[in-house]
Image (tube, rainbow, N blue to C red):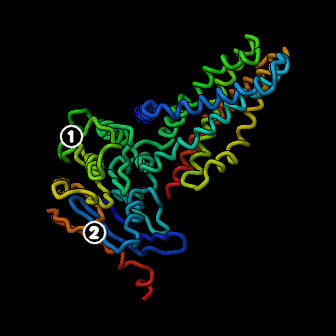
Amino acid sequence: MIRALGWVLRRDLLLAFRRRGDVVNALVFFVIVVSLFPLGVGPEASQLRNMAPGVLWVAALLACMLSLARLYAPDHQDGTLEQMLLAGEPLVVLVMGKVISHWLMSGLPLVLIAPLLGLQFDLPGDALAVLCVSLLIGTPVLSLIGAVGAALTLGVRGSGVLVALLVLPLYVPVLIFGAGSVGAVASGTGAEAHLMLLGGFLALSLVLAPWASAAALRIAME
Amino acid sequence: MLEARQLECTRGDRCLFTDLSFKLGRGQMLRVAGANGSGKTSLLRIMCGLVSPSAGELRWQGRPIRDEREEYSRNLVFIGHLNALKDDLTALENLQCAAALSGKPADVGRMLAALERFGVAHCAELPAKVLSQGQRRRVALARLALAPAAPLWILDEPFSALDVGAVVELELLLAAHLASDGMVVLTTHQEVQVVAHAILRVDLDLHTAALRAA
């Protein structure tokens, strides 16, 4: 079972490596959106510090959603998804492999580059650290929930908008507590509560989302 | 043994076929015939377990395939209309992934031998996107030549896009599979010469709802 997960992961990472442009797209989008805010709003340091968590988290969320279209659609088009459904392993395991590779390609780069972008907003060191931790816990949740949305809209015309409508309401709690954690550090109340709630979301979506996504895939293939 | 009991398939509000029953035993080949749009591909997808029939059921070794999906899938190779090749992976990598996902990882030597059987070993290191349609089909079919073979093969138009040489090779492969107690289900519009002691035939045109009512 673990071996099948490894194979899906390995295949998707290899594909991503061969098509680096797709991975870079989401990252460039994130960097551009976040970098434009200080230019647009002006150099007022306290104002930038206040809006930094929200801007960074919203940009990360949108960047993650942009890449959802590529999660299942290419596999659906060339028939490999069909073969995954017929693999001798539980579909949930393979879905988990795809979600992990999606996070490695679209979530992890954002986590790594976020502290650098946070500097543009004059965020202090402790806030930058919490920003990283909140993104590290939060972006896997985005990938997991997104996988359900992507599976539900598979093969539907205009699925991009539909995914946004389906997935955004579920992303909102993650956004609130993710951005809230950084804000809480700035205001001196400590981020533990927010981060624990984010961890709770992660645990919950880790348990539920792969099953929901696998069930949705089976329905989509009928 | 694969047994179909009174299968019915409806797409939208149109009934494609109804009351379709057959038994497929070891060493037997089932050829699904029917006009375009008569539901051949739908029947094959039902037989794989990708789609559930609107009525009736399929049994593998006496047990409904719905109940043990993974176990059934391990005994099955399905090659559909789509070749299931990733454009950015090489022919060899594609074959490797397909073998690993079906639970039978293969080493490079065996995979090259399988590609060689279909005359595409020289393309092993080329990405699938530069292969011609016929070559892609050959790479997809090379899965069949990978030992140990799954007992049940379900092939949707396996001969499409193949040249004469590859058609003969596939016919030989099918005959060998049947001779070693394998089972084959296929659809094709071509006349094929497969040596087998039992070739069953299901004609979907004879199972439409209108005919049943008459």
Residue B174 left/right relative to A204: left
Image position, residue A56 (x, y; %): 72, 26
- Asked which quadrant contains residue A199, the reply is top right
Q: Give the residue at x 77% y 19%.
A: A191
Residue B121: which numbered mark, if any? 1
Residue A20 left/right relative to B200: right
Image position, residue A148 (x, y; %): 60, 44
Where's the N terminus of chain A, which quadrant? top left
Q: Give the residue at x 69% y 30%.
A: A33
Q: Secondary structure at mark 2?
A: loop
Q: CA distance from mark 2 to mark 1?
A: 28 Å
Tag 2: amino acid: His
Image position, residue A195 (x, y; %): 73, 23
Q: Identify the residue under disc 2.
A: B189
Q: Give the residue at x 58% y 38%.
A: A67
**Dot 2 or dot 1, earlier in sequence:** 1
Q: Nearer the viewer, residue B86 or B151?
A: B86
Q: Residues within 10 Å of mark 2 (few under 14, many from 20)?
A: few
Tag 1: amino acid: Ala
In the figure, B213 relative to A64: above or below? below
Image position, residue B103 (x, y; %): 35, 40
Q: Residues within 10 Å of mark 1 (few under 14, many from 20)?
A: some
Q: Nearer the viewer, residue A87 or B172?
A: B172
The chain to which mark 1 is attached is: B
The chain to which mark 2 is attached is: B
In the figure, B2 relative to A2: above or below? below
Residue A1 seen in this snapshot? no
